[in-house]
Image (tube, rainbow, N blue to C red):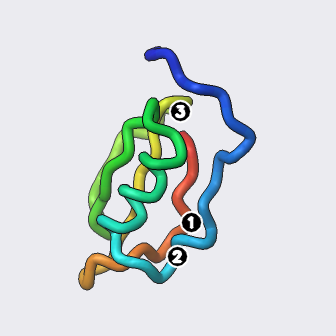
Amino acid sequence: MADCKVTSKTRWPELVGVKGNVAVTTIKAENPSLHVFTIKKGTIITAEYRSDRVRVWVNESGVVYVAPHIG
């Protein structure tokens, strides 16, 4: 795993309802060591846990519909 700055924050429920690009920018500003990116609803992904990754799930309109979290 890449070096990951340890923070107490692992979830961002306050970002549900905002545009995906805004959520990504917000999370990266809070913890630049995280790999943060959007995933479109319905996309098939791998299930492994990574402490340096945040997937930001967006709907067809590009709006976050699941609270982003580390994993």
Q: Nearer the viewer, residue 53 or 6?
A: 6
Give the residue pinned by disc 3: 49
Residue drawn at the location 64% of the way across and 54% of the way down: 11
Give the residue pinned by disc 1: 67
Indicate the amino acid at tag 3: Tyr
Q: Are marks 3 and 2 in contact (CB under 8 Å)?
A: no
Please report whichever mark, 2 or 1, sits nearer to the chain's N-terminal start: 2
Indicate the amino acid at tag 2: Val
Residue drawn at the location 49% of the way across and 30% of the way down: 52
Give the residue pinned by disc 2: 16
**49 over 42 or under it: above or below:** above
Query: Could you say where residue 67 lies in the image, as x and y percent from the top left?
Result: 56, 66
Indicate the amino acid at tag 1: Ala
Query: Could you say where residue 17 lies in the image, as x and y percent from the top left?
Result: 47, 82
Q: Are marks 2 and 1 in contact (CB under 8 Å)?
A: yes
Q: Nearer the viewer, residue 39 or 13?
A: 13
Please report whichever mark, 3 or 2, sits nearer to the chain's N-terminal start: 2
| Of marks 3 and 1, the one in the foreground | 1
Query: Could you say where residue 63 lies in the image, as x and y percent from the top left?
Result: 36, 79
